[in-house]
Image (spheres, grey):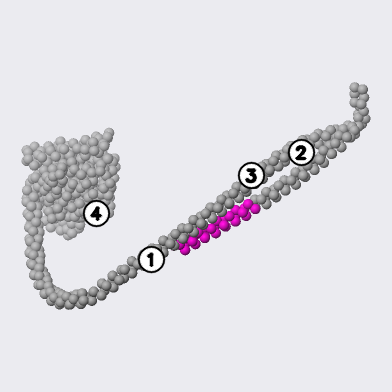
Amino acid sequence: MLIKENENLRGRVQQLEISLQQRAEQLSQLESKSEQREWRRGEELRQREDRVRELELELNKERGKEPVVKYVTQTVEVESPATVRQLTKARQRNEVLSERLSSQNERCKQLEEQIRKSDEYSCNLQHKIAAYEREIGKLREELLKEIGHLEERKEEAVKAAASCSAEHFQNLQDQFFTLQKRLTALPPTLRSMKTDYASLRSQVRNFSEFYGAAINEAKKQISAAISEMSEANKDLLEKYRKEVALRRKLHEQLVELKGNIRVLCRVKPVLKEDQHEEGQSVVVTTDPNNESSLTVMNKGKNRSFELDKVFQPHATQEEVFQEIEPLVTSCIDGYHVCIFAYGQTGSGKTYTMEGSVENPGINQRALKHLFSEIEERKDMWSYTVTVSSVEIYNEVLRDLLSKDGEKLDIKINPDGTGQLHVPGLRVIEVRSFQHIKKILATARRNRITFGTQMNQHSSRSHALLCITVQGTDLASGSKTTGKMNLVDLAGSERVWKSGAEGERLKEAQNINRSLLALGDVIQALRGRHTHIPFRNSRLTYLLQDSLGKGSKTVMVVQVSALERNLGETLCSLKFAQRVCKVELGPAARKIESGGGLCD
């Protein structure tokens, strides 16, 4: 450390000497420049003084010349024009010389001013040189003092290091003697430890063999017990699954016999855009082992709802349609079928019924299955399929397949059957699934949708797609007439929450009024009242055939799992439970044999 510090000091002294030498060189350069400037200015001053003297001599010569004029009494007579011109030229030259003399005087003043400034600058340079010399002297004194101080510190550090080294050497010597004494006492202890280690090693070897045998025996016993338990659990699980399947099958048969409206529940999955908003916690949970129940968390308490089928949030469109597929076959066999989606706005009703281009919903899948069944039966049956589509907007019935959206009305069919029909409704016969896809696209374009605070593409009307299938048995000649209504209800909404105003407010009021009328009809059917208020709304009046006796009806209730929609979810599930208890009676098949129409 002392050597390094000494080297650092030497390096610093060298740097200071180099800096001092550089400043001396700068000072000499400044002195030479100053001398050159003074010499140049003296030369310029001498040249200008010579020029001024020459100009003064020339001016005096011009003044000494006599003008060629004659003095006459009171007048001046010019002898000739040449003399006049010479006089004029002399005057002009005199004026020019006067101007040049004045400019030379000004130039002399400027040169004197510059000489004065040069003198001041030279004085400043001399002062600066003196200041530099004083500063260099001070730096030399400081350098000498610092070198002396560092030399003193160096001597002190050397003395301190020498004293510390002596003490450290003494300590090391003492430790060495202590270790030497301990090493002489270690061999007897080491021999006794080796003897103890050999005996312990033999004991451990015997114990490990005994321990391994015991562990192997215990493993065999535990594996045997686990295999027995797993076999028993497999049997119990298989029995439980069979019991659940049997219970579900018997329940469906009971529902079929009673004619109950089957209620399916689909929980909308939590989307990415919903995760960044307030109230996004999930309050609706489903049980994977129980397909007929779901639980809602409300004010810290769980409330369970029992329905016919509860789909998991990740259920696909195909899984939902598999529950409804038998109803499509029933329509071909001559039954009246109704499938409608119910729930708050934005809960996914239109997605379930219509779907998207890549993932179609119930409507397209049902029609595709219908034509597939017709194709399989073409050797035994001949079928005619007709389609119509209407919407109920602000309690006005509109044809979705007409260009101008003609307003329609509901009447009693004059054929005496008591069935309802809509005069002027456009009914199109279809022969293939591709044809009906174009019709569905037309109806989708004509349906009225607007954006609200709860849904960017909210359906503002109830849409009903009606498919009529008339079949003829090629062998017996008997005829069947089946009818399938696919209904996408407009979403129930709370006006303060959806932010509806103006025309949207009127739409919301009419939607809620028609859904309230549907609730009154369900309540009357559940209580088996003699009078069912179908005519209280265009919606219930149009669904009278589907909600009446002898029909097969399925309601898909759509609910949101988010906490912010808890109120609407509870209302939808309570309504679904009431619908579950409605009995429409056994389904009736519409078939016409040679003797006439019979059920």
Three-letter code for the amino acid on which mark 1 is drawn: Ala
Q: Which residue is mark 3?
A: 124
Per the rendered image, the range of residues in magenta is 1-28
Q: Position of residue 488 (x, y in %)?
A: 21, 45
Closest to the camera, between mark 4 and mark 3, is: 3
Closest to the camera, between mark 1 and mark 4, is: 1
Tell me the distance, in whole angstroms, between the alpha carbons under discs 3 and 1. Answer: 62 Å
The earlier-in-sequence mark between 3 and 2 is: 2
Mark 3: few/some/many CA within 10 Å (<14, 14-19, 20+): few
Three-letter code for the amino acid on which mark 2 is drawn: Gln
Tell me the distance, in whole angstroms, between the alpha carbons under discs 2 and 1. Answer: 91 Å
Q: Position of residue 317 (x, y in %)?
A: 21, 53
Q: Which mark is residue 166?
A: 1
Closest to the camera, between mark 3 and mark 1, is: 1
Q: Which mark is residue 104?
A: 2
> Which residue is painted at 11% across and 74% down in the image?
210
> Which residue is painted at 11% across and 48% down in the image?
306
Three-letter code for the amino acid on which mark 3 is drawn: Asn
Label 3, secondary structure: give it.
helix
Tell me the distance, in whole angstroms, between the alpha carbons under discs 4 and 3. Answer: 110 Å
The earlier-in-sequence mark between 1 and 4 is: 1
Q: Magenta region's main secondary structure?
A: helix
Label 2, secondary structure: give it.
helix
Q: Position of residue 216 (x, y in %)?
A: 11, 72
Q: Is residue 599 left or right of residue 152?
A: left
The answer to whether the residues at label 3 and label 1 have Cβ atoms under 8 Å apart is: no
